[in-house]
């Protein structure tokens, strides 16, 4: 399977909406948090596969600005799982030359989660291998509004002129500044929507939605490779025509 994937057209940036943990658990009459725990196992496998494939950026939607609507106990469990993951895995991630980056507002996260994220970013900041962008407390609309605020502020301070604003400049005010737009976006779990994830950045991203049989904890490296194979068979036109 690894061989069938063409080394030439490996997506530079893959973004994933890791959805379906709750349903995975409910189907087994387990609490939703058991699904989230199993989801971490899938995450580990996909990070490992991404390193092997020499993918440059992997962006993972772990917690949206709307996920605060969930019961407090589930939010707590998700945050502790993230802390546990980083505590357990940081040395292994670092050994694999992985750079951890965060997208989203760190303010508002429980203190231990914020500290663990900051520590992981600090320890891995000079790594040159896979960059894992973890989107936590992330919402694309909030990100866009924040970019507009920062641009306005810079104009008011005479650091920027309205004539300087173009698509490129705007991108640099987003949290994904410096990160190429995703080539491929995968959503597991059978929902066909973006749920406020990377709206600006996904303008020309290839979208791949799994059906509802494939929930995030079911997402193996084999399925990941199948997704990349499908991506490699797509024709990206960017508004042009095939040549
Ligand atoms: C995705 O799984 C994980 C997060 C949103 C944090 P869900 O918890 O949304 O699982 P379903 O969609 O309810 O099955
Ligand atoms: C999207 O999943 C967010 C994450 C995977 C972190 P949701 O389960 O929150 O999305 P909706 O509510 O079904 O749109
Ligand atoms: Mg969901």
Image (spheres, rainbow, N blue to C red):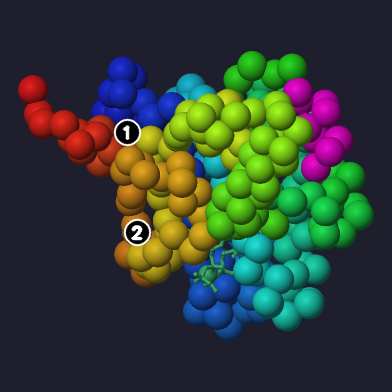
Looking at the image, is 213 positioned above or below residue 159? below
* Residue located at (73% from left, 80% from top): 71
Specify whether residue 85 is painted magenta.
no
The residue depicted at 50 percent of the width and 49 percent of the height is 198
Q: Tag on residue 217? A: none
Q: Residue at x 47, y 32 (%)?
A: 166
Can you tell me which quadrant of the image ligand 1 is in?
Answer: bottom right
Q: Quick check: marks 1 and 2 in contact, CB under 8 Å?
A: no
| Camera-nearest residue between 52 and 138 | 138
Q: Is residue 10 left or right of residue 101?
A: left
Mark 2 lies on residue: 210
Region of the chain picked out in magenta, as a range: 117-125
Per the image, label 1 sits on a secondary structure element best described as loop
**Mostly what secondary structure, the magenta segment?**
helix
Residue 56 position in % (x across, y down): 51, 25
Instruction: Kindly tell me whether mark 1's CB lies below 8 Å from ligand 2.
Output: no
The part of the image, by quadrant, that contains residue 59 is top right
Tag 1 residue: 1
- The local secondary structure at tag 2 comes to loop
Whether residue 41 is visible: no
């Amino acid at each position: 399977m690894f061989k069938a994937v063409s080394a030439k057209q490996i997506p530079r940036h893959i973004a994933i909406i890791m959805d379906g943990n709750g349903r995975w658990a409910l189907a087994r009459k387990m609490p939703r948090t058991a699904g989230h725990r199993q989801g971490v196992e899938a995450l580990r496998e996909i990070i490992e596969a991404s390193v092997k494939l020499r993918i440059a950026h992997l962006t993972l939607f772990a917690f949206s600005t709307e996920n605060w609507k969930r019961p407090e106990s589930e939010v707590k469990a998700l945050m502790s799982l993230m802390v546990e993951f980083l505590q357990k895995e940081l040395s292994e991630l670092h050994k694999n030359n992985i750079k951890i980056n965060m997208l989203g507002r760190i303010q508002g996260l429980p203190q231990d989660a914020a500290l663990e994220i900051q520590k992981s970013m600090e320890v891995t900041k000079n790594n040159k291998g896979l960059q894992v962008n973890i989107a936590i407390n992330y919402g694309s609309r909030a990100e866009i509004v924040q970019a507009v605020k920062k641009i306005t502020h810079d104009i008011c301070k005479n650091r920027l002129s309205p004539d300087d604003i173009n698509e490129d400049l705007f991108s640099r005010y987003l949290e994904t500044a410096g990160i190429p737009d995703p080539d491929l976006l995968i959503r597991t779990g059978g929902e066909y929507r973006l749920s406020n994830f990377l709206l600006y950045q996904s303008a020309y991203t290839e979208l791949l939605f799994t059906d509802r049989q494939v929930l995030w904890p079911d997402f193996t490296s084999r399925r990941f490779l199948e997704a990349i194979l499908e991506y490699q068979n797509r024709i990206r036109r960017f508004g042009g025509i095939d040549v």
